[in-house]
Every structure is written in C-alpha cells, then in structure tokens.
Amino acid sequence: MTSTNAAEASALEQPDAAEQALWYKDAVIYQVHVKAFFDSNNDGMGDFRGLTSKLDYIEELGVSAIWLLPFYPSPLKDDGYDVSDYHNVHPQYGTVADFKLFVREAHRRGLKVITELVVNHTSDQHPWFQAARRAPPGSSKRGYYVWSDTDQKYKGTRIIFTDTETSNWTWDPVAKQYYWHRFFSHQPDLNFDNPNVLKAVFRTMRFWLDMGVDGFRLDAVPYLIEREGTSNENVPETHAVLRKIRELIDRSYPHKLLLAEANMWPEDVRPYFGEGDQCHMAFHFPLMPRMYMAIAQEDRHPLVEILAQTPDIPEVCQWAIFLRNHDELTLEMVTSRERDYMYRMYAADLQARINLGIRRRLAPLMENDPERIKLMNSLLLSMPGSPIVYYGDEIGMGDNIYLGDRNGVRTPMQWSLDRNAGFSRADPQRLYLPPIMDPVYGYQAVNVEAQERDPASLLNWMKRMLRVRKESRAFGRGRLVFLKPGNRKILAYLRELGDEAILCVANLSRSAQPVELDLKRYRGRVPVEALGRTSFPPIGDLPYLLTLPAYGFYWFRLAADAPPPSWHAEMIVPEESPVLVLFDGWVSFFRDQVVPWRMGMAEALYRSLESQVLPRYVESQRWYAAKGERLEATPVKDHAVWEVSERLSWLLTILDVRGVDYFVPLALAWEEDEEHVRQLAQSTVARVRQQANVGVIGDAIADEGFCRNVVKAIGESRAIAMRRGTLRFTPTRVFRELAGEDFAALSVGSLLAQSTNTSVTLGERLFLKCYRRLRPGMNPELEVGRYLTEVARFANCVPVAGAVEYATGEGEPATLALLQAYVPNQGDGWSFTLDYLQRQLETARAGPGDSYGAYVLLVQTLAARTAELHRAFALRSGDPAFDPEPLGAADVEGWKARVREEANETLAMVRSEELQARRGQLFALIDACAAPRGAALRIRHHGDYHLGQVLVANNDFIIIDFEGEPSRPLAESRRKHSPLRDVAGMLRSFSYAKWSATRSGALDAWERETRRAFVDAYAAAAAGSGLFESFEDVAGLLRLFELEKALYELRYEINNRPEWLQVPLAGILAMLEEEAP
Amino acid sequence: MTTVELTLEPLRVFLRQMGDFLPRLAAALLIVLIGWFLARAARYAVVRLLRAVNFHVVTERSGVDAFLRDGGLRIDTAEILGLTVYWLVLLGALVVGFNSLGLAYVTDLLVQVVLFVPRVILAVLILAFGAYFARFVGQALAAWCRSLHVQDAELLGRLAQYAILTFVVLIALDQMGIGGDIVRQSFLVVLAGLVLALALAFGLAGKDWAADLLERWWPRKRP
C-alpha cells in the first residue's frame, strides 16, 4: 500500500478519539537500532537519515510502530543504555534535526515512534554524575545519585550482570564514597528520592514528546527506588514515581504511550499497570522463553501454564510480547531445571550463553528451519498482546556469537548482497560491527533484496501474516480461550472479541499431528483459513477434526457469514430448520385422511407446509430459477403418498411456484435410523416430531431407498396414481442391459446439484437425474437419448435407461426424471479447459508454435465426435422426428430474419457506443451470410452445445444434455436446424474459456489455434456425410450462427451478469473487424 | 223415501264416506311421498356430513368397515348410518300418514320401530368409536411394551384391544336392548372364569415364590 492509500484508508475509517488513544492495543511494533539499519553517510554506522530512507520498507512490512533503541549521546559502553546527554542525538547517528525529519516521515506513513527513556541510571560520563562526585556529600548535586560510605548497604539485592559485576556498589575515588548501580559499574543509578531528579526526567520527556515522539519504553523500571531490607525491586515508591510520570502524560500528552520494561513474573509486572494509572503497556517476559520451550518439548504445557498464571490487566492496558530483542534471550523467568533444558536445546555451544540467557537470533535458534520460524512468528502474532518484531528477524537474519557482549544480535541489517550487505558503502573494516557472512545466514544468502523478489520468502510471508493480523482486532484485543484437545502436541486457542472469533491451531511437534477440537460453542460457523481465505466445512456437533503438518499452524476466522465449501455435504440436520409436529406420518398433512378430532391440526400442518416449510426450502435450492425472491407460498398442486412397504413411503408433490410447476418428492426419516437421517441431512426440508420420535423430512432424491425404488419402478413399468394426475415409470429397451439384475443393491452417491436438476449416481452404473421444473412436452434428452442409443447406436453419448413422466390428462406429459447410464469421467470440458488454461498461465510456457499441442489434439477429437453426432442425426430411420430434411434458401432467409430481429432487440438493450456505431456493419454482416449453393441438410442437433456439455473421459468426449437452452421451450430444441449451430456454439465457448482464464490477451493465440483445429477437424470428419457439400460452402452459415449465439450471450449477460458483458461484445466486434475490408 | 232412494242410500253413504276418506288418503300419500323425499335428502345429508367430518376415517381405522366388507356388504358405516336415518325419516312419515288415516294399531307398531332406530344409530356410533378406541389402546400398549422389550408385545396389545372391544359390543347391545340379562350374565361367567383361571395359573406357578415371600415377611420361627 502506498502512503497516499494508507492516508485515504485511515481517513475513511475515521476512528474516534477514544479508539485512537488505544492505538497500541492493535499495534505491531518493529524494534530497530539506528546504528544497525542503514548508513547514509558511509561512515560505517547507521544513522537517522539512513533510517528515514528505509521507512518505506518498514511501512510495507505492515507494522504500525517503530521502537528505537537509545540514540542519545553516550560512551556506548552498554549499546547506548549509558546516556550521557538526555537532550541530544548521538553525533554518529545525526542531529536533532535529522530525528525530527525522521519522526515527520514516519508519521506521514502512519507509523508511530517509540523511543527509550533510560532514567534508572546514566552514564558515568553524564554531567550530572561528574558534578555529583565533585559536589560535597549531602549537597543537592551529590543527591542526584545514590551514595554510601559502605558497600554493605542493601545487602538483599541480587546482581543482574553476573558475568561482569561482583557488587552493586562501586568505589568512586573522587567522591570518596561508594555509588549504587544495578547494572554495569559505569552506569550509576539516579536517586528518585530526590524530587529534582524527577523534575529533570519530566524535562527530558517534554523535550522528546514535543518533538512528536509517540511513546517511551521505560528502561529498567523496577529498580528506580531503593529501600533497605527489600530486594530493591518493585518497591511501592517506584509505583508512586510511575503514577507521577503518567499524570504528566495524561495531563499534557494524551494518546502517548508508556511501555514498562520490567523483567519480572507476570504477577509482579501487574502492579506496573496500576489501575490503568501507571504504564499502558509492559513486556511479558516469561511468555517468550515458554514459546521456545513449548517447541523444544513438543508440548503446549509451558505456554498454557504461563498464560493461566498471567493476571488480567485493565481494559486500556496491553502486554508487549516478543520472540527476540536486542538483549540475550533471557532465562531469568524460568526455573533452573527449565533453564538447563533450554541451554541444552538452544545453546549447546557455551559461546552462545551470556548472563542468564542465550545471545542468538530467532533463525539460528530454530536451526534455520523455515517451518519452525514461521510457527514461532504465528504464535507471536496471535498471542494476547502487541507483538514486537526485532529488526532482521523478518528475513531470518543470523547472528555472530563470537562478537563481545550481545553485539552478535546487533549486526548490520542485510539489505542486499552488495558490499557490507548493502548497509553501508564504507570500507568493511570501518563498520561498527561486521555483517554476518557465514554460508547459511550470510548476507549473500539472506537479504532483503532477494526476499522481496521471492514470493515464497520469509519476508513476503511476514508481510502476508501482518496483513492478515490487521484484518481483525481480535488479535490485539480479543479474549484468549484455550481449547484443550487430547493431543498435547497441539496448541489451540480462540481469540474472541464481541461476535468475532479467531481460532489458532499450532502443531508444536516435528511430525504431522491430528487434533479433535471441541468447538460446540461455534456450531454452524464456517472456519475460513485466514491466509488463503479457504472455507472449511462448517463446525458441527462432532469434535472438529484437523490435521496439521510438522510445525504447521492454522488461523481460522470462525465466520458466521461465509458459505461452506461448495462440495460440502451436510451430514447433520441444520438446527434452524422448522419443526413440524406430525401425528400420523404423511397422513398428518391431509385433512380428509385423519380422524375427526385431528382435522384442525392436519389443516394447520398443511398450511405451514405450503406457506412456510416448502417455500423456504425451494428458495434456497439451486434449481429454483428465480433466486433472491422471497416466496410467500408454494401450493401443492398434486400429490401422492408412494408406499412400497410399511417403513418406506414418500410424499410426491408437484408444487406451484409462481405459476411454474416443480417436482419435489419428500422422504421422512426417523432418528433411530441414523444412516437414513444422515442421507437426508444434506437436503433437509424440515425437522419433525411424532410423539417421542424425532426425525427429518428431506428431499427424497437424497434418499437411497427412493432412488432404488424409482429404478425398480422404471424396470417394472409401474404407474402411480396421484390425486390429479398419474406418474408413469417407463424403461427403454436397454434398461436391463444398463441396470443389470442387482440394481436394488447399488449404493447411492451423494447429491449433485445443478442449475436445473438434481442428480445422484447409483453405483458406477446408473445416473438418476431429477428435473425439478416441469416442462410439458417430449423431453428431447429422453427422445434423443433413445434415438442415439437404440436407432443410431452413437457410442459417445449417455445411453438412456428409462424415465419418469407425469401426466394429468390435459396437455402433454412432462418428464420428471431420467435414468441414464453412468459414464466415468474426469469432469466436463469446461472445467477441464479452465484448469488447463490456468496451468498454462501459471507456467507461462506458452510461446508461439505448437505449445498447445496436447490440447489441440483433444479438440480435434472433440470435433470428430461432434461430426459423428451430426452424422448420426443425418441417418434416415423413418422416424419423422429425426429424418433429415433438405436445407433450402427459404430456411436461410428465415434464420437471417430472425437474427436481424434479435440484433435489433439486442442493440436496444446494450449501451456500447462502439457497437452502436457499427450497427450498419452488423446488419451488413448478417445480410452477407450467403446460403449454401450446394445441397445441405437440416437435422436434429444438440441445440445448446458448449464445453460444459461434453464430458472428458479417457482423452475422449461424451456428449450430454440434449435439453436445449433451458430458457427456451422444449419444442424449439426439437426443431431441425443446421448442424453448424452446434459448431458455432462450441467456438463461442472457446472464447468464454479464454476470458474466464484471463482478461489479458495472453491466450489469444490459444483461442485462434483451438478454433482453427476444431473447424478443420470438423470439416474433415463431416466430409462426405451429405450434411453439406463442402465446408467453404457453409462458412457463411457458420458466421451467421456464431453471430446469433454471441447476440444471445450479450442479451443474457446484460440481464444476468453485466460484468461479463465484455466477452460476447468483444466476440461480436472481432467478427465485425474480420469482415471489415 | 223411495226404493231407489233406499237402494241408493248405502251408496250415498259409501260415497260420502269415500268422499271423506279419499282426501285423507291423498293427504297421507302426500305425507309419505314428502317423507320419502325428506328421507332421501336426510340420507344424502347425513352421509355427506359424516364424510366431511372424516367419520369414515374412524370406521376405516377401527376396522368396522373392513368387518363389513368381509361380511359381503358393499357399503361402509357412514352409509349404514345414512340408511338408518333414511328409514327413520321414512318411518316417521309413515307414522304420520297412518295416523292421519286413523289406523291406530299400525301407527303404534310403527312408533315402536321408529323409537328403536335411534338406538341403532347410537349403537353404531358406540361401536365405531369404541372399536377405534380399542385399537388405539391396543396399539399404544403394544408400542409401549415393544419399547420396554417385552416379549409378546403384540399379543398383549391384541388382548387389550379385544377386551375393550368385548365391552364395547356389550354396551352397544345393551344400548339396543338386545339380549340384556343373558349377555350380561354370560359376560360375568366368562370374566369369572378368566379371573379364576388367572388365579389358578399364578397361584400354582407362583406358590413357592409366594411362600418364600411370606416366609420373609412373617417368618414362622425366629432362630
């Protein structure tokens, strides 16, 4: 995101002042050392100008605040934590003006700036100390520090830097007294009992806050005040000092932050928040080693334990959490046994140990295993608190444990593989520290430049993670709830904020792990994986099963608004479906079939079935044409209870949905038959109860018994009398052959929902397709299927085994269901083509030449099959419905007239100036389409031929769906026409495939090549069939039909998918272009 | 008075009597005719009404219709009730008709019959609803026993159903005043026999168990 976009975005959100004040609760802080980031003046040391020039990088990373390590004048004996002047910038880092510029630039990018307030101690070079040691004892100047005549005072105080210091007192020969220091002997502690010291600190704070600094990290805050007889840590007077500091902030500098560094146990840190009247934030020190421990032990216990011990903090406060920082990985906050374990696991090399910790960076600690590094980062970003990312860890930088003190983790940022890692143009020997140069972590291997270009790099992964984290406030503010799955290697927790919930699951072990999570509270929600936005199956009653790869993790948004994956079959009855109370099975619905005292109930039940239950069900179905409208009622026009045995009966209904008839058979399953209930769960219409029995009513197509009995009834040519009409089951001659003898034992597959019908497979043998909408008239699919199977013996279609028809005595019967043979296939040609094109685009191998060879070969097969189909239709069988007829000039004129009419209609609808401008040309094109001079035939044809109507099977094609266009009446698709209409349809389909795969012109060559191959192969295969004399002779017709199809598509897209308008429009314009002289 | 007059006198009397009687006959015939029409209308109305309130469902479910069908009748209970009402109305009309003709004996006889018809109707209703109730209880009992996994659940249900049905038939017969005492007594005999049989069965089969129980409650001797 560019800075202007960020500014716009923040302007759009308009967070109110209260929200703004809590910015630190959602912050991700980037910890950076000025000297280590970028050197602008080539003196070997990073500076503010350099840092300012790299702000774009920090902004792009996706963090929201920068925490700067001390940059004040200092002898640099403790990396700047020994300040010798509080009101200036170290000359090597630049000037105060440089700092001001940096703050302004950071704010322009929406980044907050946090600096260090190191006031527990100063450098012994600080003028205050120099004055104090020379001032007489008891004077005001001497009183700035803590002095004693003996080093036996405050005996109970521990020594922090055990490796270098032996006492907290050091003799000053000038002052002739011991001075107090908790850290190095060159860092005398300031005396906060002296009010002048606090005043001086306030002056310092005002100085930086006035310059725009957004917050302070309070260094070594537990040690401010000393009291005899205590450990001199966390004494109550220290908190009084903090309250005074906070008062200053609240009074004069709202929205500014105080971040306490108190390396203590959480219960000891808790007082530093006060009641929201001390620090806004404090580091959670013990959490950090426990993240490492959890991974080392492959057990979630250390983490769960420490977070259980973490006390609640005031609403306005926040923890600061981190994986690594500029100090050693401190092991003060673990037991000595745990420390030994950590040392063994992470610092087998003694050189890596320092004080009570390990001086290594994240990547070396994780042995540079990208999965573990990512897992640790995912924990950091999802644990309660605002995460801090240490500079360099976002690219997996290494360390150098052979440098003194903790300098090994403070080496120059690795920008590129240029000299000095791109950090500085200075001579390498001038650098403040040498960059990492080993073969694994060296800047040649690990640098920003390389990782920015590698989409799979750690840096880009971090950017994605930070972007995802920003999407939900639950990460920063949510409540933490641990789930306790049986598998202890899995850490699973929820972050909940209001209605929002994020589920984080992490596998702490080095092998793949399964886990079953109890998510009952979120029943019905759909987990959406946060990084890929993939919907997972919705949460049900059963434990939620997940499998995680080694060191894998998931973040899920438990979405109440996301749809479940399209392939998901509901196995559990949705709780929200209505409940019907039955008293006598199906009979309960019918007033005239119940005992007198139940008549009222039956009427009420029937009413609720018609006006509530079925409308809600029909509305939600894909096969219901008019979507998005609320149905008031769906009167049952005709019905019958089909009973094959006492336990097997179905209610077959014909519903009147806004004047259109729909076939909805219903099945009833009782709870004791769990398998049956499960089958119906994917198409639940209602839940039912009859006395102590509960069950469901579902769509019978999902009912195994129903499907089998339909097949059986077809085999037996049965008829069922309904209240008004009759349901007739009829087999074709090949029924026995296709169904076999044992069809009653075939297993029924799960429901496939299409736009106009619902279908199931029976074993690998039969395919039962239930048309929902009743279209009176001979169903072409049945008719054509019969003809092609029984008369023409065309192999590449799906044979028909039988049909179910509904007749009322008035008008023609309508086909309700069709039983076909099941053809094993690899999906339809459309998805096959799209997959192919996606692969082509991704691999981008497609150059000119025959790079589409494999696909072209398939298209040639498709063309040959198409021609064979047309040859089959051109047979003379004596059946007037199928016999070919000669194609005359009058036919062509009729078609042209119709296309002209449609063109007029389309032009009236479309608002394309380009097309309107070429109106004349369009009509000229229609007129120019010449009728064939030689003999040609009009035959039955497919009618709605496109890639979605062919199945790919073993590098061959099966042609399906002879229904014609669903929106046109059946009689129209039975009319005889030129076979070139099918060819035109397929050519348009190629164009759609291209546009669906990409809107760029990358696949133009593919479309050209595919078209040519299809047309040529079709012409070759149809030659000599009598369909036409030569392909050139009918080229005009083909163009006319292609135009007709494109116009139809244009009208369709205007009405249904305006964003697709471009596809047919481009097609028409291309055709006009081609014709233009 | 002339001879002619004398000879004509009886004729005149006869004619006068005929003159008196014929209008009454005509009126009676008219009444009967209207009654016939009314009866047909009543039968139609009753059958329609019974069908409208799903009386046929009750008789079908209770098994009465099936019983009738088994007996070779081609009509169901609703139609039987219709027919009864038809006859009730028609007989009513005949009573009025005969009464207007002054045929007291015939009228009395018919009144007896007319008074019997409502009892028949009531008996049919009792039979229909009673049989439905019997079947309902039988099925409920069987279902309950099945849910408790009692063996012979069906048998127990059937027993209950037929026991109730017996009562129902008795009540219906009682309602019609047929059989009266003999039915009642024979029922008592059957019931007594049944109870005795049960007492014997349980007594003989369970005497050891009963003895144990008694022994436990009231031990003969304390050790």
Image (cartoon, coloured by chain):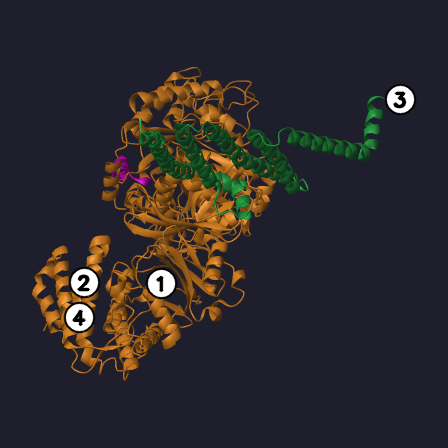
Tell me the number on the disc at residue A620: none
Residue designated by label 2: A1047
- At label 1, the amino acid type is Ser
Q: Callout 4: helix, strand or loop? A: helix
What percent of the width, then of the height, locates residue A220?
Answer: 45, 29
- At label 3, the amino acid type is Arg
Name the colour assigned to chain B in the rendering. green
Q: Is residue A350 visible?
A: no
Which residue is located at x 52 percent, y 59 percent? A747
Label 2 or label 1, whichever comes before in sequence order: 1
**How far separated are the C-alphas under marks 4 and 3?**
115 Å
What percent of the width, then of the height, locates residue B24?
Answer: 35, 30
What is the chain identity of the residue bearing mark 2? A
Residue designated by label 4: A1040
- At label 2, the amino acid type is Leu
Magenta stretch mostly in which secondary structure? helix
Q: Nearer the viewer, residue A232 or A621?
A: A621
Label 1 or label 4, whichever comes before in sequence order: 1
Label 2 Cα neighbours within 10 Å, binned few <14 / some 14-19 / many ≥20: many
**How far separated are the C-alphas under marks 2 and 1?**
24 Å
Q: Is residue A390 left or right of residue A301?
A: left
What is the chain identity of the residue bearing mark 3? B
Q: Nearer the viewer, mark 1 or mark 3?
A: 3
Tell me the number on the disc at residue A831: 1
* Residue interval drawn in magenta: A92-108
Same subunit: marks 2 and 1:
yes
Which residue appears farthest toward the right when viewing the image? B223
**How far separated are the C-alphas under marks 2 and 3?**
108 Å
